[in-house]
Each structure stands twice: as structure tokens, then as C-alpha cells.
């Protein structure tokens, strides 16, 4: 832009490269479909209100999700009131966690583990944990899908939260046909903080049965592991365990030391189990390769001897071979690293 | 805490870390494994071959590169960074030859590469090279050399070492199995390199690439057949050793 002698401001070419700036500006203004969807969801959220305990607080964009405590069950009132219905009624449909039946694809009216009796519940979060369970546990028995959890958040690749295709179910639940009280969940998507509470409600219900043991498998990058040693000297991948107070069985590896913490859905599940006094253990694999990797998936092998997975893996050498084929099939050709 | 000191590599953290250099070392771990062994009369470089796409020309995907007739190098980490470092090293080798009419020593070229890497840890607006290198060769005095450099710009001489993914496992194997007897014979040194790689390489010999330099001889790259031959010899030896063991227990 330039000012003329007569006081007008006109568009003029500039040797300082204003044209490039304009192009950059134009690119910044151009919105991607993801941006549009996020804006739509945020606009809907800004209209919803919810109750925090006895207070009524308007939900605004500035509301800090972490301080809302709705994603962490410890902050809830467990004396009997169930604020979940109030929460669900105010949740915009785009971020709702829907639990669907397998055959009819209709929503489940009650929580999954209230509908079915469960003695062992194994949850795999993340692609390496999912690959491990698929190869070692699911290939050793006949598992039947009982439902799936569909959800959308900013991390999902699809931009249409409402019309997600049936093949994009991200959390799938199975039970073992020969022993229907053994359940397994393969969760390969990211469950956002504001959705974790819904997920727990829809899976576990408001009053979970005490005779259930929960095992969670997940991965984390080794640089998140806080230790006085240098990360270069750590033998990654390696396994660490974190258990609830009611978990009395021996663990398959050393316990996670302070000040390390657990994040996301595994943390929510473990917190929920701790509050409801359920025996639960989390096996966390610290790895330097976050994408699908054979060594990382195989690092979970010691867990096969735990009570939660005992008897579920039959042919370990064959399962290792299946895991290898899965890795090769999923390998994405990349020339960045050699 | 770390995030406050990530942005400019010239900034130390309160406990003396240069996080960008440490992150570069993480990038090295993303590259496939490379192992180097210094024998009595031979130096060996073995690498885990990266799987090549169907339509990709395999010839252009190389982890072992010659820097001069008597020096070669294997790297692990960012491919593009390796290309830049190798080009600079090759130019330096020729420039040295033209200037002083002598070939570079292995230590000289290693020091050159390490100095180059160190410069990039101390300049604004630049990031460190995300590669570690194993440099092998023979000097004019006929002594075999093996050096390793890392993104920080340090370099050390080694008898045997590994870099890249699973380097720790391979190094532990070498610590247990590297003996003077094992490396006195050229063939044994080659087998040691292959055995070390087989500890971590999936699907055996077809994913291994091997290069050797013998005293007063040029670099030799092993063909796939030659590697398969070595691998099958190793498997036979392993079977025989197991048979002997089971006879002893009986």
C-alpha cells in the first residue's frame, strides 16, 4: 500500500516484497475443511451450558478443559448422583462418544459392561499395543465383536463428525466366545480430554462391578520418561507398570517411578478404577519409535504371563510371525531416515 | 522445562544440556543399524538394508559410501544430512590430495567431519546434523582404523561399534564376542559383523549390506549371493555347535 500526494491510500507494488506478504496473507485466510469443522464445533460449544457441582457456569471458549474435572472421575460426585445425563444433554453432538451395537449399529442404551458380565477387561490404546493384542491374543482364540465407540475430535482425520463411515469405528470391543466374560478393547484413536469421561461412562457405567480386573496396554515416547540417566543409555523399548490400590497380583515389570505420570485415556481408565476400587494395572511401554514397530510391540510380551492375559495367547512363535507380517503390511515407505 | 531451551541450539539449559544436539541423537536412532569392526588386516562395515519401494532404484539407496579409495563411511540418521556431509568430506579428500599430494588419513577426515558437525551446534539459525557416522579405512602405515562421529561433533576411535536403531543391543553383542581371536582372521571378522547384525535385523541375510577394505586393496562391496553364503555358513556352524551341546548334555 502507498499513500499518494492527495492523501489517498492505494495498492502499489513494493520492492520490499509486499506481494509475497499478500500471498501469505491470502494463504493464512484460506481455511481448510478441518478449520471450518473446528470453528463450527467451538461455536456450538459456546452456546451450551453445564453444571459444575452446584455452580452453573457458562461454557465459553476460554473455559479450561483441564480445570473442568469432567474428564477425571475423581472430581465427580460418586455418592449416587449421576450428572452424566446433564452433561450429555448439553454436549454438542459432534463430540459425543457413541457406543454402537455390532449388528444393528444402534446405540447401546446402557453401558457396555453393565449389559455384559465381565471378569477381565483388556484395553489396548495406541497402534503398537493394538498390534500386539491383535497378533498374540486375538489370533489365539475366537473373538466376537460386541460393539464399537465412535467419536470425533480435532485429531480425527475425517472432517465430518456426523456421517463417519462404519469402517471408521475407532474403539472396537470384543469378547471371547469360549469365555464371554473376557473383554478386549482396541482403541487406536485419540480420545480427547472432554470425551474421556463420556467414554468411561458408556463403557464402564456409573456403578461398575467389583469382580472385574482391568489391564491397560499403551505406549509413550522415551523422551517423556523422567530419569536422572541420559535417554541415550535407556534400553528402549522398556515396560513400566502402574497399578491401583486393589490390584494385588504381581506385575510383570518394574513399577513406574515418580515423577513420571500417565496421560490421556489410560490415565482416565486407571483413575476411574482407583476411585471405584477396581483392580487395574497399566503396562506402559516407553519406546523411541512411536509408529508401528516390531520391537515396540514385542516389548509387551512379558504381559502374556500376567493374570489379566493368562491363557489367552496360545502359540507365541506363530503370533510373532503374524506380528511381523502386520508390520510389513503397514510399513510406509519413507526416505527421510536411512 | 526442556521446551524453553529447545529453540536456539546455542542456549544451554540450567543443567548443561544442549537439547537440540540430544534431539539430533534421537534422529540417529531412527536410522537402521550400522556396525563397524576393526580387524587385524581388515575393516568391515555392515548395515541393515532399508526396504526399497518397488519402483525405486535400489542402487540409489545406499548407507555405505566411499569417501576416497582407502576410506569409506556408513551412517545412520537423516538421509539428506548424510548426503551433505559425504559430499563435503569427498571434496575435502580430493582437496587435501591436490594440496599436499598425500591422501588423507582416516583420522584427518574424521576430524574434518566432526569439526563440521560441531560448527552446526554453535551457530544461530542452524540445527545439528542428524547423523552418526562410522568411518573406516587404512592409513599409509597399513594400520586399520575405525572412528565414530555423532551429531555433537565428537569423534572416537573404536575396535568395534554400532550406530542407529538397536545399536545398544548390537554393541552388547560385540562386547561379549569381540576377541583378538575373532578378528585375527579376515573371514572371522566378517562373520562377527554379520552375526552382530543378525541379532537385530529381521528376515536374515537379504536385508544386510556389507563392505570391507583389506590392506592395500580398494573397497569391496559384497553381493547379495556372497552375503547369503556367509549367512548359511554361520547357520551351519550354529547347528553344529548346538549338536555338540546336546551330545555333551546326553
Image (cartoon, coloured by chain):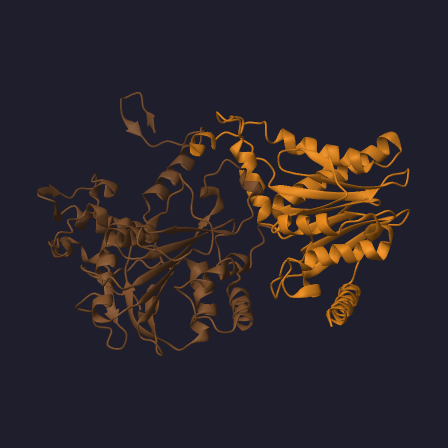
Residue A154 visible (yes or no):
no
Q: Nearer the viewer, residue A316 or B213?
A: A316
Q: Nearer the viewer, residue B220 or A182?
A: A182
B109 versus A189 height, above or below: above
Residue A22 appears left or right of B195 = left
Quadrant of the rendered image containing residue B130? top right
Residue A161 appears left or right of A20 = left
Residue A231 visible (yes or no):
yes
Q: Residue furthest top?
A: A5
Residue A302 % position (x, y): 49, 60
Residue at x-position 12% and y-position 44%: A53
Residue at x-position 59% and y-position 35%: B128
Tally of numbered discs: 0
Residue B249 appears left or right of A323 = right
Q: Which chain is orange?
A: B
B88 versus B184 height, above or below: above
Residue B58 % position (x, y): 68, 60
Residue at x-position 48% and y-position 69%: A135
A291 versus A329 height, above or below: above
Residue B103 % position (x, y): 86, 37
Q: Colour of chain A?
A: brown
Amino acid at each position: 500500500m502507498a499513500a499518494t500526494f492527495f492523501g489517498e491510500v492505494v495498492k502499489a507494488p513494493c520492492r520490499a516484497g509486499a506481494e509475497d506478504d499478500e500471498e501469505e496473507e491470502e494463504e493464512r485466510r484460506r481455511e481448510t475443511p478441518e478449520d471450518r469443522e473446528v470453528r463450527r464445533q467451538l461455536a456450538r460449544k459456546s452456546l451450551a451450558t453445564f453444571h459444575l457441582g452446584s455452580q452453573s457456569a457458562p461454557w465459553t471458549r476460554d473455559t479450561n478443559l483441564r480445570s473442568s474435572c469432567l474428564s477425571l472421575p475423581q472430581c465427580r460426585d460418586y455418592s449416587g448422583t449421576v450428572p452424566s445425563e446433564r452433561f450429555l444433554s448439553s454436549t454438542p453432538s459432534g463430540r459425543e462418544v457413541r457406543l454402537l451395537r455390532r449388528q444393528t449399529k444402534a446405540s447401546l442404551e446402557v453401558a457396555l459392561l453393565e449389559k455384559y458380565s465381565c471378569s477381565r477387561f483388556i484395553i489396548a490404546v495406541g497402534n503398537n499395543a493394538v498390534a500386539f493384542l491383535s497378533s498374540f491374543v486375538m489370533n489365539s482364540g475366537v473373538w466376537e465383536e460386541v460393539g464399537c465407540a465412535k467419536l470425533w475430535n480435532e485429531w480425527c482425520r475425517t472432517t465430518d463428525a456426523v456421517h463417519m463411515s462404519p469402517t471408521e469405528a475407532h474403539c472396537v470391543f470384543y469378547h471371547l466366545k469360549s469365555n464371554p466374560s473376557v473383554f478386549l478393547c482396541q482403541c487406536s484413536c485419540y480420545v480427547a480430554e472432554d470425551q474421556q469421561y463420556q467414554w468411561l461412562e458408556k463403557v464402564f457405567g456409573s456403578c461398575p462391578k467389583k469382580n472385574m480386573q482391568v489391564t491397560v496396554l499403551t505406549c509413550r515416547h522415551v523422551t517423556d520418561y523422567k530419569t536422572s540417566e541420559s535417554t541415550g543409555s535407556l534400553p528402549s523399548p522398556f515396560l513400566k507398570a502402574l497399578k491401583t490400590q486393589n490390584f494385588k497380583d504381581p506385575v510383570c515389570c518394574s513399577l513406574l517411578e515418580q515423577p513420571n505420570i500417565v496421560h490421556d485415556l489410560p490415565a482416565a481408565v486407571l483413575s476411574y478404577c482407583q476411585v471405584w476400587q477396581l483392580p487395574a494395572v497399566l503396562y506402559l511401554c516407553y519406546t523411541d519409535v512411536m509408529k508401528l514397530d516390531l520391537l515396540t510391540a514385542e516389548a509387551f510380551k512379558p504381559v502374556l504371563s500376567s493374570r489379566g492375559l493368562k491363557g489367552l495367547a496360545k502359540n507365541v512363535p506363530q503370533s510373532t510371525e503374524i506380528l511381523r507380517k502386520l508390520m510389513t503390511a503397514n510399513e510406509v515407505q519413507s526416505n527421510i531416515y536411512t | 522445562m526442556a521446551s524453553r531451551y529447545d529453540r536456539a541450539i546455542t542456549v544451554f539449559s540450567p543443567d548443561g544440556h544442549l537439547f537440540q544436539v540430544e534431539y539430533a541423537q534421537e534422529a540417529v536412532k531412527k536410522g537402521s543399524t550400522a556396525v563397524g569392526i576393526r580387524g587385524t588386516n581388515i575393516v568391515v562395515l555392515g548395515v541393515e538394508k532399508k526396504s526399497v519401494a518397488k519402483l525405486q532404484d535400489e542402487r540409489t539407496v545406499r548407507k555405505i559410501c566411499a569417501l576416497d579409495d582407502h576410506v569409506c563411511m556408513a551412517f545412520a540418521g537423516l538421509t539428506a544430512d548424510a548426503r551433505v556431509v559425504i559430499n563435503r568430506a569427498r571434496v575435502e579428500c580430493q582437496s587435501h590430495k591436490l594440496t599436499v599430494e598425500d591422501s588423507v588419513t582416516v583420522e584427518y577426515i574424521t576430524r574434518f567431519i566432526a569439526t563440521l558437525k560441531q560448527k552446526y551446534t554453535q551457530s544461530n539459525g542452524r540445527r545439528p546434523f542428524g547423523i552418526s557416522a562410522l568411518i573406516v579405512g587404512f592409513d599409509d602405515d597399513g594400520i586399520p582404523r575405525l572412528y565414530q562421529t555423532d551429531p555433537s561433533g565428537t569423534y572416537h576411535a573404536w575396535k568395534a561399534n554400532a550406530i542407529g536403531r538397536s545399536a545398544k543391543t548390537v554393541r552388547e553383542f560385540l562386547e561379549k564376542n569381540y576377541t583378538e581371536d575373532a578378528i585375527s582372521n579376515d573371514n572371522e571378522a566378517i562373520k562377527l559383523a554379520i552375526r552382530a547384525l543378525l541379532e537385530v535385523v529381521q528376515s536374515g541375510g537379504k536385508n544386510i549390506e556389507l563392505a570391507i577394505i583389506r590392506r592395500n586393496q580398494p573397497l569391496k562391496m559384497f553381493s547379495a549371493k556372497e552375503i547369503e553364503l556367509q549367512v548359511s555358513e554361520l547357520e551351519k556352524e550354529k547347528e553344529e555347535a548346538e549338536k555338540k551341546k546336546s551330545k555333551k548334555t546326553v
